[in-house]
Image (spheres, rainbow, N blue to C red):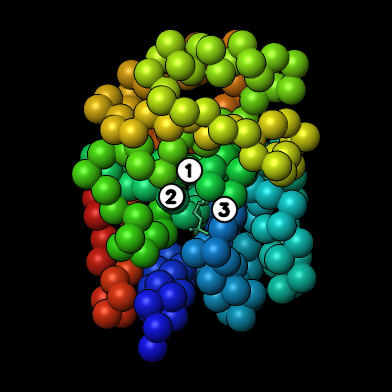
Amino acid sequence: MSASDDVTAAKEATGRAAADLVEDGMRVGLGTGSTVHFTIVALGERQPDIVCTATSVRTHDLATSLGLQVVAPDEIGALDIAIDGADEVDPQLNLTKGGGGAHTREKVVAEMSPRFVVVVDESKLVDHLGPFGTPLEVLEFAPGVVTSRLEALGARRVTTRDERSDNGNLLMDAHFERVAHPDRLAASLAAVPGIVEHGIFLGSTVERVIVAGADGSVRELRH
Ligand code: 5RP
């Protein structure tokens, strides 16, 4: 098996493990990405009696194509569990999210649930957030002004992606290299006018991280 096959197998193992937490009667938040994809596929196979809300158009389309009931966040109101992937996980379970550009909706959905479960392969585990870059959803109005503010906060480089978010906004990545204090950076980014949402999710919001290794092992990280 190639290294990329190993990563895909690990994503499937963790994604499917999270699906086992979903029980009949639950209201479920469905994240976005290639790992939670396998959670959604597993739920589609099992067809539990659940109502879901989706964090992106592509998750909505996947889940509905598999026969799952998906409604808008306002229609569902509150969730029992939300399951999503991540781009980085540090030892305090702080996360970088937004590699797929869906972090604004992902944060709304994660905060609707008392249980936020994260699924990753072990390549996502880091000592400190930062190497991936910090995804940002930004209003098109003044990206240059936002970039200056990010540089003042310590960003070495700020890039803008070609694609837009599902909300029609710009997607940018700020490279802080090593984020020593995710809580402080999260607060600073939240205070920049023009940033709709940043991709730092604090570990205090995470119930557990399900991690799969290339050897097929699955383990959980909790506080
Ligand atoms: C999308 C996200 C994803 O959860 C994150 O990028 C991880 O994706 P993948 O499971 O494909 O590695 O935050 O905005």
Q: Nearer the viewer, residue 99 or 107?
A: 99
The circle drawn on residue 87 is 2
User: Quick one: quadrant of the N terminus?
Assistant: bottom left
Q: Residues within 10 Å of mark 1 (few under 14, many from 20)?
A: many
Distance CA(mark 3)–CA(mark 1): 11 Å
* Local secondary structure at mark 1: loop
Residue at figure coordinates x 53%, y 34% from the top left: 173
Residue at figure coordinates x 62%, y 34% from the top left: 160
Residue at figure coordinates x 64%, y 47% from the top left: 55
- The three-letter code of the residue at mark 3 reads Gly
Count numbered badges in the picture. 3
Q: Any atom of ligand 1 within 8 Å of the CB at mark 2?
A: yes
Q: Residue 147: horizontal and vertical position, in percent?
A: 56, 18
Q: Residue 210: horizontal and vertical position, in percent?
A: 34, 61
Q: Residues within 10 Å of mark 3 (few under 14, many from 20)?
A: many
Horizontal side of residue 218 vs 7, given as left or right: left
Q: Nearer the viewer, residue 41 or 113?
A: 41
Horizontal side of residue 162 vs 113, given as left or right: right
Please tell me in which quadrant of the rendered image residue 124 appears: bottom left
Q: Any atom of ligand 1 within 8 Å of the CB at mark 3?
A: yes
Distance CA(mark 1)–CA(mark 2): 5 Å
Residue at the extreme bottom of the image, as rendered: 1
Which one is closest to the eye, mark 3 or mark 2? 2
* Local secondary structure at mark 3: loop
* Image marks 1 and 2: residues in contact by CB distance under 8 Å: yes
Q: Earlier in the sequence, mark 1 or mark 2?
A: 2
Q: Nearer the viewer, residue 76 or 102?
A: 102
Q: Any atom of ligand 1 within 8 Å of the CB at mark 1?
A: yes
* Local secondary structure at mark 2: loop
The residue that disc 1 covers is 97
Q: Residue 51: horizontal and vertical position, in percent?
A: 66, 58
The residue that disc 3 covers is 31
